[in-house]
Amino acid sequence: MIDEPLYPIAVLIDELKNEDIQLRLNSIRRLSTIARALGEERTRKELIPFLSENNDDDDEVLLAMAEELGVFIPYVGGVEHANVLLPPLETLCTVEETCVRDKAVESLCRIGAQMREQDLVEYFIPLVKRLAAGEWFTARVSSCGLFHIAYPSAPEALKTELRAIYSQLCQDDMPMVRRSAATNLGKFAATVEAPHLKVDIMSMFDDLTQDDQDSVRLLAVEGCAALGKLLEPQDCVAHILPVIVNFSQDKSWRVRYMVANQLYELCEAVGPEPTRSDLVPAYVRLLRDNEAEVRIAAAGKVTKFCRILNPELAIQHILPCVKELSTDSSQHVRSALASVIMGMAPVLGKDATIEQLLPIFLSLLKDEFPDVRLNIISKLDQVNQVIGIDLLSQSLLPAIVELAEDRHWRVRLAIIEYIPLLASQLGVGFFDDKLGALCMQWLKDKVYSIRDAAANNVKRLAEEFGPDWAMQHIVPQVLDMINNPHYLYRMTILHAISLLAPVMGSDITCSKLLPVVINASKDRVPNIKFNVAKVLQSLVPIVEQSVVEKTIRPCLVELSEDPDVDVRFFATQALESSNQVMMS
């Protein structure tokens, strides 16, 4: 018999050497259980050294190991022994697979954040220095992500050394290392003292912004916003602003795209005045960029950007570009613009919206690309608040009708989902005149998803405008369709009735909806009959007990004797359910 405490480690060692990757993975994921069985001392002396020597070549196993070790401090005896976890993670920081290295860095950061200050100086900082001086680039890439944990605890002399090492990494021969240095610069800068921030960090930042690799420069753009928040406003204008302006004219479209994407954060970093004087021209250039991707990113930020400016500046500089973008050759640019342009209305005010923006909305509403039209319609409430319903509805209706009859069913589906929103924005009068007929038309669509959405739409409208309105405008038309010769359309009406009943209440359900359902139980199509059973089951909790006894149960009993097996099944199920409801 194997000695009990030895047994788990023996199994683990066997399984970790097993050829089957699944067994190796399972045993790695059970490390915490095994560590508990071994106890803290044996975990430190046997398990961790064993893991340090484990040279598994499967990335999935290594990834699991990197993740497990990050939460291992309690199993090795607490924070005072945390340093024993560093060697296996240091090895994992040098492997070739990126996701394993990233997870190892994440676990090291988690452990480092809990370590005592003297242990950080004694064990963690030397580890960072070893990785940063690693022969293979993977170690140097990983080291960049650890400086922000190591730096705050270091004594002054070591701090100077760490800044010098990071500066070297920013000028490394390998672009991957420089990329990692650019990505982590913001985190590192946040821990550096103000005097060194201006001198050392800014010189590293300058190196990265002038890198010959666009992949490094575009990561430096992200650093602009992070550094801008750390610097004093005047330093930010002196050091960060010129970089942003240069980046907005960079020869690589990826860098310009990054600037367009981050522009709002960059504006917040430099403050309102420099934004108006320097960043507006840069933004206008990006809106007119020759790469569609850059224009998409810039167009998506147009409303946010306008909020920082006063209306005059927005009208003078941004609106002309918005006009150009509304007729852009790329449908994706127009779509990005359509999704945010509505937000400009409150910024510009009523007159400018009617005069300048409304024509742009209308041209986008007539766009040949359905996504552009939908993006406009989904954000209508913002314009409605500014210019009022009359102006809006005249221009809007033709576009809605066109989308409602679009040949792509997904477009029809999307517009149905906006109908309740439109109804609440445009009011009951407008809805009755213009949109009521469309809602009925969708119940007879050729595509099931549309019919299903149309039934839900009818319910949501009844909730929005109340049962009295629904009784007048929706229920009669819906019930008329139960005589449609096609059984699929009759089924849609049954579905609509089951959705309407809870909204309409017991009286209307008993007087208007229930007779139609009972009648449908005589249908010749079995699918209709078993759907009748389902609908009746859903009506039991809504109507009074006497109605269930006199009307619903006799109908279900009749259906439970139907020749069709499915009809019998659903009718029996409904009867059982109604019994339970009655008893409760």
Image: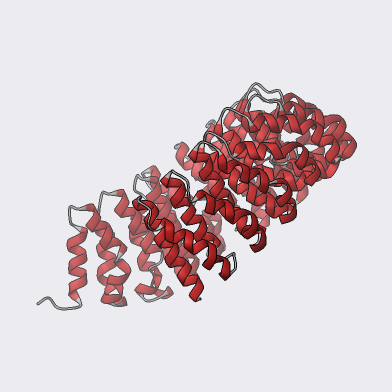
Note whether 178 is above or below 256 in the view shown: below
- Residue 85 in which image quadrant: bottom left
How has the structure been colored for display? secondary structure
> What residue do we see at 76% from left, 42% from top?
432
Residue 165 visible to the viewer: yes
Image location (x, y in percent) of residue 277: 82, 36
Count of numbered badges drawn on the protein: 0
Return the residue nearer the eye: 167 or 185.
185
Front position in the image: 452 or 551: 551
Residue 54 in sight in this render: no
Splitting the image into 4 quarters, where does residue 159 fall? bottom right
For image coordinates 66% across by 35% down, the residue present is 374
Q: Residue furthest right?
A: 351
| Front in this rendered view, residue 204 or 38 | 38
Residue 313 image offset from top left, x and y in percent? 85, 35
Res. 207 image quadrant: top right
Residue 581 shown left or right of residue 502 in the figure? left
Q: Where the N terminus falls, by quadrant?
A: bottom left
The x and y percentages for residue 276 are: 81, 38
Q: Residue at image x 48%, y 49%?
A: 522
Compared with 450, 65 (above or below) is below
Q: Position of residue 83 (x, y in %)?
A: 39, 68
Does 332 appear above or below 41? above
358 horizontally vs 220: left or right: right
For the point 68% across and 56% down, the residue is 194
